[in-house]
Image: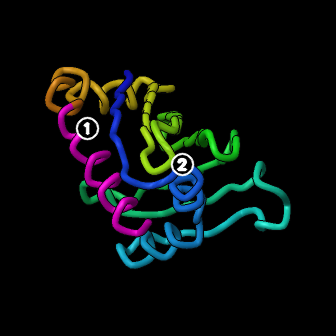
Amino acid sequence: MEFSATEDIDAPMERVFELLSDFDHYERQAIRRGIDVRRISAASSGPLGRAWDARFDLRGRPRELRLDLVREETPQGLTFAAVSNGISASMEIDLIALSSRRTRMTAVLKVEPRTFSARLMLQPVRLGQRKMTRRYRQRVGEFAKLLEGRA
């Protein structure tokens, strides 16, 4: 299953990438929302190889997530891979400079079940994919506005 969204941001591409790769900021945001986040690798180990373990409640059940940074091309984009409870996902964020002060961000999320129970869990999402695509695009739009505000 794949979701994609494209947003234009009123900020230079280098600044948008800098904000996207501010992992300390996202760790603090997750902790404020009650997510237990633990960085596996240090920032000094280079851009690739960064990884996080997260624990949180979703729909009343405890969940665990492993997130790995698998690609960092300054300032073109980032790719993350995640594994959680039989579901694997990848998030690819690409940046294109439209002008010196405007950037286009494309975010593609791919989700795949790895077990039968994960397939059953994702079935309602598959049936409501049009609605989920709309919600995904709305969330990416909100995220782009936050980046624009911070830039």
- Residue 109 in the figure: left or right of residue 95: left
Q: Is label 1 in a helix, a strand or a loop?
A: helix
Closest to the observer: 52 or 118? Answer: 52
Crowd tier of the residue under label 2, counting other residues whose Cα lies within 10 Å: few below 14, some 14–19, many 20 or above? many
Crowd tier of the residue under label 1, counting other residues whose Cα lies within 10 Å: few below 14, some 14–19, many 20 or above? some
* Dominant secondary structure (helix, strand or loop) of the stretch shown in magenta: helix
User: What x and y, as percent, mark residue 33?
Assistant: 35, 73
CA gap, disc 2 to disc 1? 20 Å
**Boundaries of the magenta span:** 134-151
Closest to the observer: 78 or 59? Answer: 78
Three-letter code, disc 2 = Met
Q: Which mark is residue 137?
A: 1
Closest to the observer: 103 or 50? Answer: 103
Residue 23, by quadrant, is: bottom right
Residue at x 62% of width, y 69% of height = 38
Q: Does label 2 or label 1 sit earlier along the sequence?
A: 2
Closest to the observer: 62 or 38? Answer: 38
Residue at x 44% of width, y 31% of height = 108
Above or below, comparing residue 151 to residue 6 in the picture: below
Per the image, the residue denoted by label 2 is 13
**Residue 146 magenta:** yes
Instruction: Give the tally of numbered discs.
Output: 2
Query: Which image quarter is the N terminus in?
Result: top left
Q: Is label 2 in a helix, a strand or a loop?
A: helix
Residue 41, by quadrant, is: bottom right
- Residue 6 in the figure: left or right of residue 96: left
